[in-house]
Structures are given as structure tokens and as C-alpha cells.
Image (cartoon, rainbow, N blue to C red):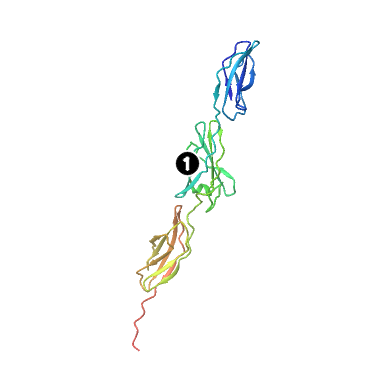
Amino acid sequence: MTIGWGSAVQGQSTEVFWDGSNNQMQRLVVIPTGQSSYTISNISRDFSFKIRYINECGPGAFSRAVSVEFVKPPGQPSPATTALVECSVRINWQAPRSDSNIQSYSTQVQAKDGRWYAIDNCGSSGQTSCVVSMSVFTQRPFYMTEGQTVKVKVAAMNQDGMGPYSIPNSIGATIASAPVMLSKPTLSESSMNSATFTWNNVSGVTYEVYGVEPNSATFYKLYESNYNTYTVQNLIPGSTYRYKVRARNSCGLGPYSPEIIIQMQGVPDKMQPV
């Protein structure tokens, strides 16, 4: 940091006093005639300074003390928070202390291998949140996998440099993807004109059940629920029915399960007299 003052009269030197080392005014330097500024290195706090001219007859009166505010990089942000938004992750953080306007943020996410990589355009304009598609985290260089927590650290930048990164969050959004294929449904109960079947349970999804009528090849959606069981009514005895299921979440639809084929029992023949 450079401080300055009016030029001294020829033959006069300048004594510079400051309180930057121990909070007490003491002489910092004597500046030769003809110079009217001095650069102080390694400043880390506010300080005050004053000057006086000195010649062969002695020093003159001190100037009024001038306070200099030390402008420094921003402080450390608090840990970021993450939340799922459909098939994306919203990252939020609070602006840290800063002596000047924060110009931008550096946002990094921890990859599967433990290394940290920057997220482009997340805080680059000074905003304190961004939404990142889930696909960003599952591709190069992150290669994150299902269920892994999205860990983020953020640092602020102003005209004097970049501050420290925030402590990474330990909880928050986890990596999600479209559901995998469900198991083939299994028949759990049946009667003359109804049947109940179930399939494996998966958390965080909605199930869709599709069926096809006898003598038809076109499946249509019968049911949508969070429960992994379905009972179909009004079936025709002696007919054959086919059903399949799939799961859905915020990232999309999973593939269809293998089909279950249900053959309904026919009505018994009329008994003949013995």
C-alpha cells in the first residue's frame, strides 16, 4: 500500500510515523527531500499515519493523523446447502464479509475420486445460488454415482483477491438417476375374476402399471401409485392377461419390467347326474 503527502521544501526531509506495528505511533521511515510517497508492504490491518518535516534546525509540527482502511479479500462463506430440484441440484450459500463488492464466486464440487473441480457459471456473476443438472455430476470429471452426497465449497472474490473456501457441506442432495428396471411381478392372490400381483419395492419412486386385454397387443396404463402391489378386478374367467410395471422419479422413467402372464381359471363344467 502506498501513502503520500505534499512535497517538502527543498532541504527538508519527511518523517513518517504510524501505529501499524503495536498500535502506538512510532517513526516508520525518514524520506529524503524530493520524495512525497512511501510504499508499505505486508499490510494486514487498518492503521493511521502522520508526517512532519525536518531540517538542520530540527523537526516541525506533526500533520493531522490520517486513518487508512485496509481493504482485503472476502472472508470465508458459511457451508453451502444443496437440495434436489427435479433432476438437478440447487446450490445456495451466503455472501461472506467483504470490504468491497464481491465480484464473483469460485464453486467447486468433490468428484468420486476425492478431487475438487470447478462448476462453470455457478456464482461467476456474483449470485449466491445456482442450479446444476444432475448429468453434470455423473459425467467427466466428477463420475459421481447413485446416492453419493454432492459436496460443495465456495470462495468469494473481490478487487483484492479471493478469500478462503467454505467448509464443505456434509449433508444435502445426493446423486439420483432414472429408476432401474423393476423385477418381474409375481402373483400373490387370485380369485375367479380378480388377481393381485406385487414387485420389488424401490424408495423415492412412483409406480406405473400397464396391462393388455385378451386378444390385444396394445398395453395401456392402468394404475399409478407409491405402493408396489396392484389388484385388477373384473377379469373374465378362462382369459389370459398380461401386465408389466415401471418406476418413475424426478429424473425420468425406468424401463418396463418383464411381463407377468395371468391365466384366469374357467368356470367349471356343469356336473352331470350320477
Q: Quadrant of residue 268?
A: bottom left
Amino acid type of the residue tagged 1 in the rendering: Ser
> Nearest the camera: 142 or 61?
61
Rendering coords of residue 13 (x, y %): 63, 14
In this view, 139 is above or below 258: above
Quadrant of image for the N terminus = top right
> Nearest the camera: 238 or 59?
59
Element carrying mark 1: strand
Q: Quadrant of residue 75?
A: top right
Q: Which residue is mark 1?
A: 129
* Farthest residue, direction bottom: 274
Residue positioned 44% across, 67% down in the render: 260
How crowded pointer 1 is (Cα within 10 Å; few <14, some 14-19, many 20+) is rated as some
* Farthest residue, direction right: 56
Q: Quadrant of residue 29?
A: top right
Residue positioned 61% across, 19% down in the render: 16
The count of marks equals 1
Rendering coords of residue 159 (x, y %): 53, 30
Please indicate whether residue 53 sits to the left or right of residue 105 in the image. Answer: right
* Farthest residue, direction front: 24
In this view, 124 is above or below 110: above
Rendering coords of residue 59 (x, y %): 62, 14
Please indicate whether residue 173 sits to the left or right of residue 225 in the image. Answer: right
Quadrant of image for the C terminus = bottom left
Rendering coords of residue 20 (x, y %): 60, 26
> Nearest the camera: 107 or 78?
78
